[in-house]
Amino acid sequence: MSEIFLTIGEMAKRSGLTAKMIRHYESLALLPPAVRSEAGYRHYQEQDVQQLRFIRQARELGFSLPQIGELLNLWHDQQRPSSKVKQVAQQHIAVLEQKITELTQMKSTLEALVSRCHGDDSSDCPILDELAQSSGACCHCVEAE
């Protein structure tokens, strides 16, 4: 019985990724190199679909590509301790919490700026004035309110 190979188009349909992303993940070694036909076309195996779905789901959760590589290695290692997987996930949660804090601060700053803007036909605009400040971050306007 011969092995069934999938084209990159079939892989894209089954995995929910584009052919471009599949080639990208292969170039990063997150996916093993495809078998090539005599004409040079990529041919994949069924287990590659599962690996791409894993990658897609990890990306949807915001894991970085290096973290995904680490998770893939752990997934393939049947002797892995689950504590290592948990550690990667906990580190990612810490990064997400930091991003949430930063986004919350940005939102507060922007809300404060918007509240100071009249939004009328006047050219006077505190939002633009604050953005033009050379001090960098404009978070001090939240404290001034």
Image (cartoon, rainbow, N blue to C red):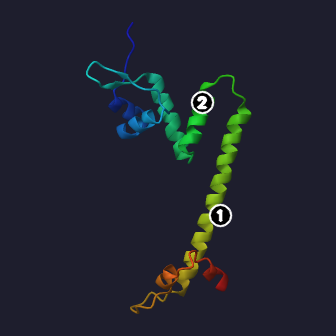
- Residue 137: quarter of image: bottom right
Residue 53 vertical position relative to residue 143 in the rendered view, above or below: above
Give above or below for 47 relative to 52: above
Residue 112: name its quadrant.
bottom right
Where residue 93 sits: x, y (%)? Answer: 66, 50
Residue 55 numbered tag: none
Of residues 69 and 53, which is closer to you in this image?
Answer: 69
Tag 1–tag 2 contact (CB < 8 Å): no
Q: Residue at x 44, y 91 (%)?
A: 124
User: In the rendered view, does 99 fall on the left or right side of 128?
Assistant: right
Q: Residue visible at 60% across and 74% down?
A: 108
Residue 37 on image: x %, y %: 31, 20
The residue identified by callout 1 is 101
In this view, the residue farthest toward the left is 39
| Separation (CA) of disc 1 from disc 2 | 31 Å
Q: Which mark is residue 73?
A: 2
24 to the left or right of 138: left
SS category of the residue bearing label 1? helix
Q: Look at the image and tell me whether residue 145 can be seen.
A: no
Between disc 1 and disc 2, whose residue precedes? Answer: 2
Q: Residue at x 59, y 41 (%)?
A: 67
Mark 2 crowdedness (10 Å alpha carbons): few <14, some 14-19, many ≥20 = few
> Could you tell me which secondary element the residue under label 2 belongs to?
helix
* Residue 134 in view: yes
Residue 33's place in the image compared with 113, above or below, is above
In the rendered image, the vertical position of residue 79 relative to residue 61, given as above or below: above
Given the current orientation, which residue lies at the most extreme front position? 134
What amino acid type should be assigned to the residue bearing mark 1?
Answer: Thr
Please provide percent x and percent y for residue 87: 71, 40
**Count of numbered tags:** 2
* Amino acid type, callout 2: Asn
Left or right of 60 on screen, residue 94: right
